[in-house]
Image (cartoon, helix red, strand yellow):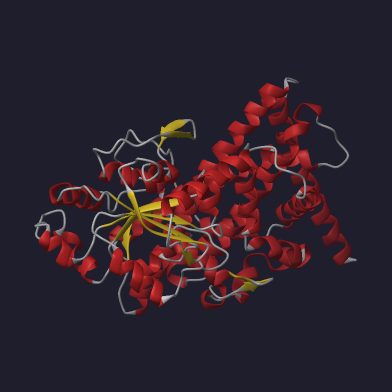
Amino acid sequence: MRRSLLVACIATLVSLSAHAEITLCRGHTEASHGTGDPVEQRRVIEGEIENFQRLSEEVLSLRAQAIRTYLELRERLDNGGHLTGADLHTLNAGAVKLLAQSEALMQAAEAHECWAEPDREYPAIESGRRAGVTISLAAALLLYDNYLMAVAPFRNDHVMRQHFNRKDRGFELHAGTLNRMAANFVSPSHRQRVRHAIQWYEQHRGEPVSFEGEPYLRRLIEQSPSLAMIGKVAPLRDFANRLDFLSAFGVDALFSLKSEGTHLSSLLFGNAVGLVETRRGKLDQRPEISERVGARLRAGDILLEKTPFRLTDTFIPGHWGHAAVWVGNEKELRELGIWSHPVVRPYQASIQTGRGVVEALRSGVEMNNLAHFLNIDDLGVLRDEQMSDAARASVILEALRQVGKPYDFNFDTQTTHRVFCSKLVYLAYGDMQWPTSKMMGRITVSPDNIAARALGDGPLSVVLLYHDGTEIGARRKEVMETLMKAPAQARS
């Protein structure tokens, strides 16, 4: 009898919660999609996809920072250290950002949730219905993944859990913040609603895409480690255990969890460097490739990469998905006369350990070694053979000036306080005239725009080219041009 009453209570709570969110969804549909004009509807949905892409990139960036912060702080505590005032400020400021992002994700999830109702028709949005449901599902899974990868480690840590569950009026953080996040994670009503969206998505995923941003949304969903978990965990058990749900998952177990062949530790590694990936690149862990590429590089070279297994590659238009600058080694910088330059001096130790790749990742502009960078399928190395030593030195100094800057999610070439990958090259090569494109409604420069200066009579030469893990030894410019034409032809 008591069990039947509990089930009835749960069913009532689920029904009330679902009704409230459906009402919100219908209000959004009427306010934003009420017109029957198909052209206007397409414009609205395209705008919603674009806004959600920006939000999701910011979410993934903060997640990467949270994972990195946790690992750094835990290592210090394990070695007998303690949390400093600066650490506590970083944790609280991060919590405020995470809560704001969670609210934005919840709104995105709820705005289109009712579009997956099988017994209702929405004539005004029928052409974009799949895109709307996909946004809703992607937003919900991002919330689950955030808890799993960026929040649960803190909550499972006694010291950090105590800190986050205390009230802090200075940051407007209420008591029990982590506990409320955990309650949302195990909420049976939330999980039932997401299962419903998953079922609708599975039924319609085979349909051809109608909007340019849909492949990004699909990749975001399919790379989610929470996707399989949500369908497997019984809601009644979640309700019964509630805040003790994750007690079975220690931090070590969390960081090695496997779900239907998806290695969570791989996803965590990817997020820790600002990426999301489902496999390793075809040039990864191949010492002979790393040695050959390293021997051919010259300080100031531009590096291009293609990683079809990463979410970022779906997000960036064109063939090339990322660009970076190789700043060289100590010997080269001494020969250029800038080894003791004030801009170089703070990075001498990094350069001496081989971290000569300057790149803008979601977690910000940082320096990495070549082996780290070569976790890719395609590589292009571009060089201005006519560049003087003075100009080359200027490129290196300007690239190093960007290290430590946050990622630019507005993709705006006209600012310098934030940097995205190809903008790093744009700023370093200040005198180069680059072609531009439009992204997120702004004039920007893409990795393909950078590569375009190596085609035809452009000033850059293609020093090295690898495609699908294999080196292209001849006609590199022609092959690069063919590769870059393929995405445009696929869209036309």
On the rendered structure, is 80 left or right of 132? left
Examine the rendered structure and indicate whether residue 291 appears above or below residue 239.
below
Residue 213 seen in the current view: no
Tell me what residue is drawn at x 80 percent, y 56 percent. Answer: 10
- The quadrant in which the N terminus is found is bottom right
Q: Nearer the viewer, residue 434 or 481?
A: 481
Decide if residue 376 is on the left or right side of residue 19. left
Above or below, 353 relative to 484: below
Q: Residue at x 59, y 53 (%)?
A: 142
> Vertically, is 191 above or below 244?
above
Q: How many marks?
A: 0
Left or right for 185, reference 295: right
Residue toward you, 421 or 335: 335
Between residue 206 and residue 84, name the one nearer to us. 206
Q: Nearer the viewer, residue 251 or 85?
A: 251
Q: Residue furthest right?
A: 1
Q: Position of residue 478 (x, y in %)?
A: 46, 49
**Quadrant containing the C terminus in the rendered view:** top right
- Residue 15 x/y as whole percent: 81, 47
Question: On the image, which quarter does residue 488 sit in?
Answer: top right
The residue depicted at 29 percent of the width and 55 percent of the height is 301
Q: Position of residue 83 (x, y in %)?
A: 32, 67
Q: Residue at x 46, y 70 (%)?
A: 284
Q: Is residue 283 visible?
A: yes
